[in-house]
Amino acid sequence: MEDTKISMNPTSVLPIVEKYKNRRGSLISILEEIQSQYGYLPGDALQVVAEKTGRSLVDIYGVATFYKAFRLKPRGKHLVSVCLGTACHVRGGPSIAQEFESQLKVRRTGETTPDKEFTLETVMCLGACALGPIVVADGHYFPNVMTHQVSRIIDRSREGLDKVEVQKDKRIFPVEVACPRCN
């Protein structure tokens, strides 16, 4: 699959590295800021961080791959997370994930559609076990999902879930979250 990425100017990373230069334990802050700028961690940016901080590229990749919040590949316009925690798993979470894979035409979770429209991921818990299986699409929770609802979730994501009147839609319940992963 072709890797389309946002154009990365290595010099744009220099002010970020300089900002955290003398701070102990600054690598995570540097990576967070780079990811917020590009939506992921471009390899060129990590090379600049290695050169300017004196850390090995292996160590930087080690941190970037250890924390699930960091991405080394661009994410799609829409993020769909299917819960596979115990409660969701026993209520059919794996079949929901397979249905998303099939309809989005991705080989497995963690991938982005070729048109960069959707990224599909699985998570181990979304904190709403009583309402499983749960799917979160672009920050909107869909409880008690069944396979026949998958196409509608995809369509609604394409249309724009933010246009939905949350108070009137029975499938969405309000959750206040401040998360850089799901916006």
Image (spheres, rainbow, N blue to C red):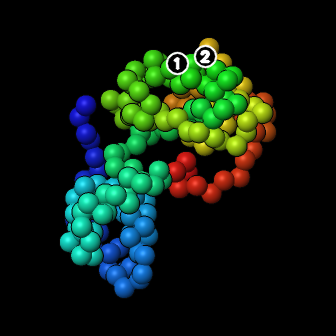
What residue sits right under mark 2 in the picture?
147
Picture quadrant of residue 31: bottom left
Picture quadrant of residue 167: top right
Q: For mark 2, does the 10 Å Cα neighbourhood hold few (<14), some (14 to 19), or many (20 or more) residues?
A: some
Name which residue lies at 38% across and 34% down.
112
Q: For mark 1, does the 10 Å Cα neighbourhood hold few (<14), some (14 to 19), or many (20 or more) residues?
A: some
Residue at the far top: name it.
148
Residue 132 left/right relative to 183: right
* Cβ atoms under marks 2 and 1 closer than 8 Å: yes
Residue 148 in the image: above or below residue 46:
above
Name which residue lies at 65% across and 41% down.
126
How many marks the image carries: the answer is 2
Residue 125 left/right relative to 2: right
Q: Which badge, 2 or 1, comes first in the chain's sequence?
A: 1
Between 80 and 89, the residue placed more toward the observer is 89
Indicate the position of residue 40 as horizontal and vertical percent values: 37, 52
Name which residue lies at 52% across and 18% down.
99
Indicate the position of residue 88 as horizontal and vertical percent values: 67, 29
Name which residue lies at 43% across and 76% down.
25
What residue sits right under mark 1 in the picture?
99
Residue 33 left/right relative to 99: left
Between 30 and 57, the residue placed more toward the observer is 57
User: What SS does tag 1 mark?
Assistant: helix
User: What SS does tag 2 mark?
Assistant: helix
Can residue 179 be seen here? The reply is yes
Indicate the position of residue 47 as horizontal and vertical percent values: 22, 63
